[in-house]
Amino acid sequence: QVQLVESGGGLVQAGGSLRLSCAASGRSFSSYGMGWFRQAPGKEREFVGAIDWNGVRTYYSNSVKGRFTISRDNAKNTAYLQMNSLKPEDTAVYYCAARGFPGAAVRKDDYNYWGQGTQVTVSS
């Protein structure tokens, strides 16, 4: 069983930056692919980015590519989402997720464990 806890959300002006963290429990973190998703009010949860077990491969949605960076520190059992040049349309609850396989994945159905989410609000 893996427990995930996100932190780092908040209110920021357009053009600003935030860094989200996802702290994972358990001793197998380094073997999990990790993903970030977001859900805006009235919309489905959508893929943001993903990273494989050792950080070599990363994937991003087109809407955040070039602005967001996903990384991980296996020694700290933590994944990160650095968000730069934020836009009002980035406003959503952001979730981190872990899957029981080392590779990254872009579909939410490929993830077994989810955090509770952290709110990100970008004002114009």
Image: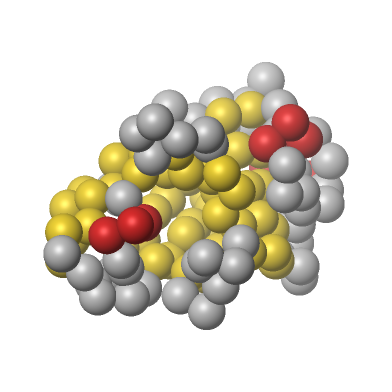
At horizontal 32% and vertical 68% (from top left) the residue drawn is 86
Question: From this viewpoint, which residue is outermost toward the front?
Answer: 42
Q: In this view, does 51 lie above or below 62?
A: above
Residue 124 percent coordinates (x, y): 15, 64
Say left or right for 88 vs 6.
left
At horizontal 21% and vertical 69% (from top left) the residue drawn is 14
Residue 90 percent coordinates (x, y): 36, 56
Q: Which colour scheme is used?
A: secondary structure
Residue 40 percent coordinates (x, y): 38, 40
Q: Inspect this view and state whether residue 35 appears.
A: yes
Q: Is residue 105 above or below residue 45?
A: below
Say left or right for 64 vs 92.
right
Front-lying residue, 101 or 43: 43
At horizontal 36% and vertical 73% (from top left) the residue drawn is 84
Quadrant placement of the N terminus: top right
Q: How many marks?
A: 0
At horizontal 61% and vertical 62% (from top left) the residue drawn is 61
Say left or right for 99 vs 115.
right
- Write down the quadrant of residue 56 in the picture: bottom right
Front-lying residue, 76 or 59: 59
Q: Inspect this view and state whether residue 30 appears.
A: no
Q: In this view, does 64 lie above or below 20?
A: below
Residue 108 percent coordinates (x, y): 68, 36
Question: From this viewpoint, which residue is outermost toward the top?
Answer: 1
